Amino acid sequence: MRRQRVVIMFVAVLTALFWMAMQQLQMTVPKSILEVKSTTPADSKSALSVLDGLAVKGRAPKTGYARTQFGSGWASSNGCDTRERILQRDLLNAVTSDGCKVISGLLHDPYTGKDITFTRGIDTSSAVQIDHVVALGNAWQTGAQQLTTTQRQQLANDPLELLAVDGPANQQKSDGDTATWLPANKPFRCQYVARQITVKAKYTLWVTAAEKEAMQRVLATCPHQPIAS
């Protein structure tokens, strides 16, 4: 019986020593190792939050505006110009000649929601046009006059700024901003406005009060719409 009590006491002492050692270990091990912290990637910026950061001003005069202020036509790299690269990006089943010039393809037009068959030709190429999402005339009147020639050329050829779209819809848009023109395809409007905001932020362009209000109305239906990438 005495031996049993001795064994019990011995086990109790060992247990106490074990817990004391564990407490000492916790005091010496860095807290960052003992604690497992959940990490989540930072949320993408919303178009609404970026819009709030844009300057709001009136339109500058259009004096001096010409397409050549943004470069003389499409920029070319390795023998392939920007138009062909955007067609290759946006058309399905694009067929090219010499790996560059697009001969045919199918466009799921974001502005109208229609499918448009593209066939290169004098009478057919204009069915699909490359739109500057922020119209160059609008860009000129909302800050682009203050950019360098190189920056304006970059803006006019930036893939972020360009979309292959229905020709007539592009002509209808002209130099319109969000306050005066929106795609007929309503499900695309949030992406369209987000892309405009992204371009304006990238090139430090401003928005007019009417333009901002129109953008806010569209984004109210999709408040978590991220900026374009």
Image (tube, rainbow, N blue to C red):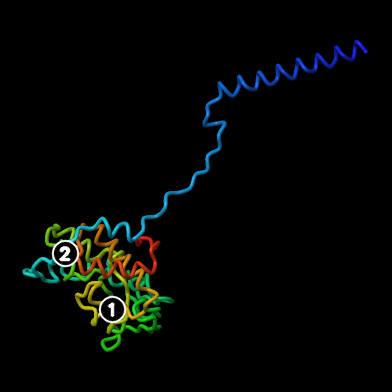
Circle 1: element type: strand
Is residue 189 shown above or below 158? below
Tell me what residue is drawn at x 22 percent, y 72 percent.
Answer: 177
- Determine which quarter of the picture holds residue 73: bottom left
> Identity of the amino acid at label 1?
Gln
Residue 20: image location, x then y, percent: 66, 18
- The 10 Å Cα crowd at callout 1, few under 14, some 14 to 19, many 20 or more, is many
Mark 2 lies on a secondary structure that is loop
Question: Which mark's residue is nearer the viewer, 1 or 2?
Answer: 2
- Closest to the observer, 159 or 2: 2
Total count of labels: 2
Q: Residue furthest left?
A: 63
Q: Position of residue 75 (x, y in %)?
A: 22, 66
Question: In front: 32, or 92?
Answer: 32
Q: Is residue 131 left or right of residue 96?
A: left
Q: Which residue is mark 1?
A: 129
Q: Which residue is mark 2?
A: 142
Q: Residue at x 28, y 82 (%)?
A: 169
Q: Disc 1 and disc 2: Cα gap in Å?
A: 24 Å
Quadrant holding the C terminus: bottom left
Q: Quadrant of the N terminus?
A: top right
Look at label 2 and name its amino acid: Thr
Residue 117 placement (x, y as % from top left): 38, 84
